[in-house]
Structure formats: C-alpha cells, structure tokens
Amino acid sequence: MLLAGCVATWLGVTAGGWLHSQLPEVVIDAAAVGGAAVALGASVAIVGAAQVLVALALARPRRWLLAGASALAAVLAATWLALAAAVATEAARGGSIALLGVSGALLAIALAYAAAALAAARASA
C-alpha cells in the first residue's frame, strides 16, 4: 500500500492530464483530477506506512499494539470491501465481465483483512 500510495501521488503531481484523459466525459478539469489523485495517494501511503510500522512492531506484541493492529485491519477490510462493491457496480453497469473476477479477488482481500482484525482483537483481549 505504501508503494501504491506513492505511485498514485506521483501520478497526481506529474500526470493529471493523462489521468483526466483516461476518464469518460467528466465535468472537472485535469488539475482537479490530479489533486484528487494526490490526496488519495497520500492517504493510501500514510495507511501503508502505518501498516508497515505495525507489522514491524508486532515482533514484540503488546496488548495495546494488537488492539491498534485490529483497528487498522478493520479499516482496511472496510476499504477493500467498498472497492469490491465499486468494481462490481461498474461491471453491472455494462463494464467488462472480467471486473466480476476482480471484484471477487478484492472481496477475498477484504475477508482476509477482516479475519486478521478479528484474530488481533481476540489476542488483545
């Protein structure tokens, strides 16, 4: 996630026009698309950095750290679930049938994060 966030931020800064050209007819301009990509990329990079820090800190698990890891995993599970729903909706609107497979893979990722959140929550209790 850290790397993906950095790439999205870089694309927003350097390639807002290209990103805008990849979208269907939209009302906003290329600068707004680039700004949105920067904001999203920075957010994803921050969450990715938090994920790396939690993973490193879990070498010596403590109850409060496991609770934080559980909360982070739950937020990520919800994020992946929302992304899976968005991709499935695009497939239902007439997008490629391959998007259903992508949506299924994203759902599997969401379920894995949810299982990790549950396991960390139980361990912190």
Image (cartoon, helix red, strand yellow):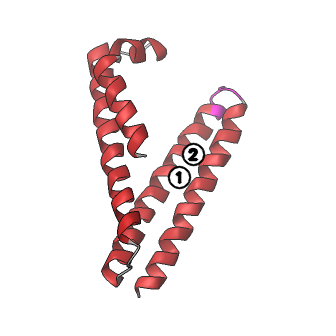
Label 1 element class: helix
Q: Is residue 3 above or below residue 77?
A: above
Bin the neighbour count of mark 2 within 10 Å (Cα to Cα): few under 14, some 14-19, many 20 and up: many
Q: Which residue is mark 1?
A: 81
- Considering depth in this image, is 6 or 114 the residue closer to the camera? 6
Kind of residue at disc 1: Leu
**In the picture, residue 88 is in which quadrant?**
top right
Q: Quadrant of the C terminus?
A: bottom left
At a point 59% along the width and 61% down the height, the residue shown is: 111
Q: Secondary structure at mark 2?
A: helix
Give percent across and percent down for residue 85: 56, 45
For label 1, the crowd category at 10 Å Cα-Cα, with few meaning under 14, some 14 to 19 and many 20 or more, is many
Q: Is residue 49 left or right of residue 89?
A: left
In this image, 2 relative to 96: left or right? left
Q: Are marks 2 and 1 in contact (CB under 8 Å)?
A: yes
Disc 2 residue type (three-letter): Ala
Please tell me in which quadrant of the rendered image residue 59 appears. bottom left
> How far across and down, in percent of the image, does residue 55 sit?
41, 64
Front in this rendered view, residue 39 or 7: 7
Question: Is residue 81 toward the left or the right of residue 69 in the image?
Answer: right
Is 96 left or right of 8, judged from the image as shown?
A: right
Q: Nearer the viewer, residue 83 or 55?
A: 55
Tell me, for residue 5, which label it has, or none.
none
Residue at point 33%, 61% (across, down): 53
Q: Classify 76 as above or below 11.
A: below
Please tell me which residue is depicted at 34% across the width and 44% down the height of the picture: 45
Q: Residue 44 lies in magenta, yes or no?
A: no
User: Which region is colored magenta?
Assistant: 91-96
The residue carrying mark 2 is 84
**Residue at the spot 63% in from the left edge and 55% down from the top edge:** 108
